[in-house]
Amino acid sequence: MAVRSVATLVENLIVGVRHLSVAACQRRFISCSSTLGDSLRDNHRQGVKLHKSQLDVAEGTIGAESWISVDTSNIDRHLPTPEVFKQQFNGIAYEELPIVYINATKNNTLVQVTDHKFNIITYTSCRLEGFKNARKKTNIAGQTTGVAAGQRLVRRGIRTVRVVVKGVGPGRMTCVKGLTVAGVDVVSITDHTPLKELGPRPRKIRRV
């Protein structure tokens, strides 16, 4: 009898421990989610902040945070200093070099050359070089326009220029390459593409 009662007590203890372990496993931790907006408009305005691992890394945006698209921490070392403006390039001061303005739109590439006093020297574009319709926005059209502008400069005795690029069209860099192919020495390339501070206007909210 004593052995049987001891065995029953041990069995009851084991069953109790099992119940405690099952109860501990079934405990659920309470977690709070982020506050949801009252409507679609509120959710649209709040937006979603992505982590760095979720951001798509685009070309030229290495090191950017989630809210800015360009890394501006080391921008000062890329800008010319006052000494550079007095520096001589092929016997001409930097601030007196002719300026080649390249406007690379999505449908055309425009090239305008001025002197340091902003007097126009020559002008050309993909359309003026014989490209029509959809061929104006190709890389080859941009390079041909750059070569034509470079040849005009060489005929005028201009061999050293600085370039100002505006826009993100397909003829953006091929036009600069065309200038160098024609024999023009490009001293510097400056990007004057306008960037909106707050980005483009968001789409209107869909009404259901």
Image (cartoon, helix red, strand yellow):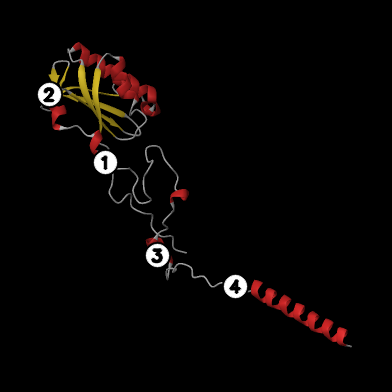
Mark nearer the viewer, 1 or 3: 1
Q: Quadrant of residue 85?
A: top left
Q: Which mark is first along the chain, 4 or 1?
A: 4
Q: Which mark is first along the chain, 4 or 3?
A: 4
Q: Which mark is first along the chain, 2 or 3?
A: 3
Judge left or right: residue 115 versus residue 141.
left
Q: Which residue is mark 3?
A: 41
Q: Residue at x 65, y 71 (%)?
A: 25
Mark nearer the viewer, 3 or 4: 4
Q: Residue at x 33, y 52 (%)?
A: 201
- How packed mark 4 is, by other alpha carbons closer than 10 Å (few <14, some 14-19, many 20 or more), is few
Residue 194, numbered circle = 1
Q: Are marks 1 and 4 in contact (CB under 8 Å)?
A: no
Q: How far apart, in angstroms, are the residues tagged by discs 1 and 4?
A: 53 Å
- How packed mark 2 is, by other alpha carbons closer than 10 Å (few <14, some 14-19, many 20 or more), is some
Q: Which mark is first along the chain, 4 or 2?
A: 4
Residue 28, numbered circle = 4
Mark nearer the viewer, 2 or 1: 2
Q: How far apart, in angstroms, are the residues tagged by discs 3 and 4?
A: 34 Å
Q: How far apart, in angstroms, are the residues tagged by discs 2 and 1?
A: 25 Å
- How packed mark 1 is, by other alpha carbons closer than 10 Å (few <14, some 14-19, many 20 or more), is few
Residue at the limit of the structure toward the front, as seen here: 2
Q: Looking at the picture, which amino acid does disc 1 mark?
A: Pro
Q: Quadrant of residue 135?
A: top left
Q: Is residue 84 above or below residue 149?
A: below
Q: Looking at the picture, which amino acid does disc 3 mark?
A: Arg
